[in-house]
């Protein structure tokens, strides 16, 4: 809990480089005594708590201002420990073999070990094995699974650098482990294995094309805005404070009015850069992986400039571009 002094909040969040000697052990000790640690994964930073400590998980909901109906992903350090938390169907083995460690979360029936608060009362649980060495070292040192949503205030842009976490959660959590920039940059793909045909609940770091190479059939979520299957599907999510709209080719809104301060999120270097108060280029060479890795950091930077509005160029909707466009559409929904 935040401490106060004469009504002033004291900054009690410690920031440690994950490669410092003793940093992982210190973080693990905090997790084991029910505290909260933000840690790097290959996708985005996570806000971690002991997955089997309901009070610690309750604090994750509190500090994130996250609705209690939104379940949290359980992170494991190896495929062998996953069956302790979930009941995996046969087809899971091939997926784990190909994509773990990595940005694929599997939703399966939960075991009794997982407290209901983690799954928001659902009888299914989302499990993944992250690929960042600091995340794996932390889970191993804690000797337990770590429940972690993205380390941002609910609905806001996800953090891909330690200072993004500090800006949103300083003074609310015990420790931030700095592991540098997240290499993938968009969250994991959430895949439900609860029916005979696996279903994508959230697009993410593993593109559907890659899943299709392993799975015979693949379905898409049919969740609605009112009844999302994964609350990451809420239309307005990943939101900047500055309104953002996605431009179509030749769109007139591209032209800022005289004196208007507009920021541009461009896919590749734009022709009309000088019209804008600020420009972020997602990938100078037109590479979707690079674009995904830069997406949230670029949005954080543009949002910090207090411009009147932001516009974004669309990216090709294939591979990681599918997840990028999903995040941009949700960011632009008002
Ligand atoms: O890459 C990631 O997945 C990051 C890193 C930290 O691992 N985590 C992340 O967590 O993005 P979060 O809480 O921001 O998003 C988790 C998504 C939410 O949309 C949630 O609704 C869905 O996973 N989810 C979790 N458990 C579920 C379940 N049992 N059934 C359906 N959806 C679930
Ligand atoms: Mg999130």
Image (cartoon, grey):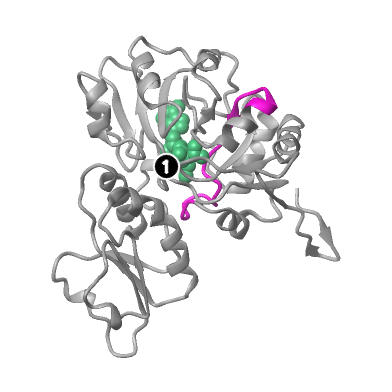
- Looking at the picture, does residue 70 appear above or below residue 170? above
Q: Is residue 322 magenta?
A: no
- Residue 311 placement (x, y as % from top left): 30, 69
Quadrant assignment, res 4 = bottom right
- The residue shown at (41%, 24%) is 107
- Looking at the picture, does residue 167 appear above or below residue 27? below
In the image, taking residue 120 as reference, residue 49 lies left or right, namely: right
- The residue shown at (50%, 31%) is 73
Q: Residue furthest right?
A: 6
Q: Is mark 1 within 8 Å of ligand 1?
A: yes
Q: Residues within 10 Å of mark 1 (few under 14, many from 20)?
A: many
SS at badge 1: loop
Q: Residue furthest bottom?
A: 258
Q: Which residue is label 1 attached to? A: 187
- Residue 286 placement (x, y as % from top left): 25, 57
- Looking at the picture, does residue 66 appear above or below residue 171? above
Disc tally is 1
Q: Residue furthest top?
A: 90
Q: Which is nearer the eye, 287 or 196?
A: 287
- The residue shown at (35%, 9%) is 90
- Residue 167 placement (x, y as % from top left): 60, 60
- Residue 281 placement (x, y as % from top left): 33, 65
Q: Which is nearer the eye, 236 or 218?
A: 218
Please state, as top left, top right, bottom left or bottom right, where the C terminus lies in the image: bottom left
* Chain part drawn in magenta: 140-158
Q: Which is nearer the eye, 93 or 34?
A: 93
């Amino acid at each position: 809990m935040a401490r106060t002094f004469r009504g002033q909040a004291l900054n009690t969040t410690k920031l440690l480089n994950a490669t410092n000697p003793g940093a992982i052990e210190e973080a693990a000790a905090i997790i084991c005594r029910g505290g909260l640690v933000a840690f790097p994964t290959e996708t985005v930073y996570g806000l971690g708590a002991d997955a089997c400590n309901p009070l610690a998980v309750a604090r994750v909901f509190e500090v994130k201002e996250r609705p209690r109906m939104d379940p949290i992903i359980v992170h494991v350090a190896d495929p062998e420990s996953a069956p302790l938390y979930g009941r995996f169907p046969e087809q899971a083995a091939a997926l784990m073999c190909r994509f773990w460690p990595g940005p694929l979360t599997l939703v399966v029936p939960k075991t009794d070990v997982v407290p209901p608060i983690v799954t928001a009362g659902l009888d299914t649980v989302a499990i993944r094995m992250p690929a960042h060495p600091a995340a794996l070292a932390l889970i191993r040192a804690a000797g337990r699974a770590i429940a972690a949503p993205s380390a941002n205030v609910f609905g806001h842009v996800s953090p891909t650098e330690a200072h993004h976490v500090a800006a949103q959660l300083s003074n609310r959590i015990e420790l931030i482990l700095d592991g540098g920039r997240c290499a993938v940059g968009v969250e994991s793909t959430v895949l439900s294995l609860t029916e005979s045909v696996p279903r994508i609940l959230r697009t993410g770091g593993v593109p559907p094309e890659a899943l299709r190479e392993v799975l015979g059939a693949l379905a898409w979520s049919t969740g609605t805005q009112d009844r999302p299957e994964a609350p990451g599907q809420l239309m307005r999510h990943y939101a900047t404070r500055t309104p953002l709209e996605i431009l179509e080719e030749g769109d007139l809104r591209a032209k800022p009015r005289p004196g208007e301060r507009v920021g541009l999120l461009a896919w590749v270097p734009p022709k009309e850069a000088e019209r804008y108060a600020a420009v972020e280029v997602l990938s100078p060479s037109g590479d979707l992986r690079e674009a995904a890795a830069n997406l949230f950091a670029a949005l954080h930077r543009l949002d910090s400039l207090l411009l009147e509005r932001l516009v974004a160029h669309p990216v090709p909707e294939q591979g990681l571009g599918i997840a990028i466009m999903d995040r941009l559409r949700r960011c632009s929904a008002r």
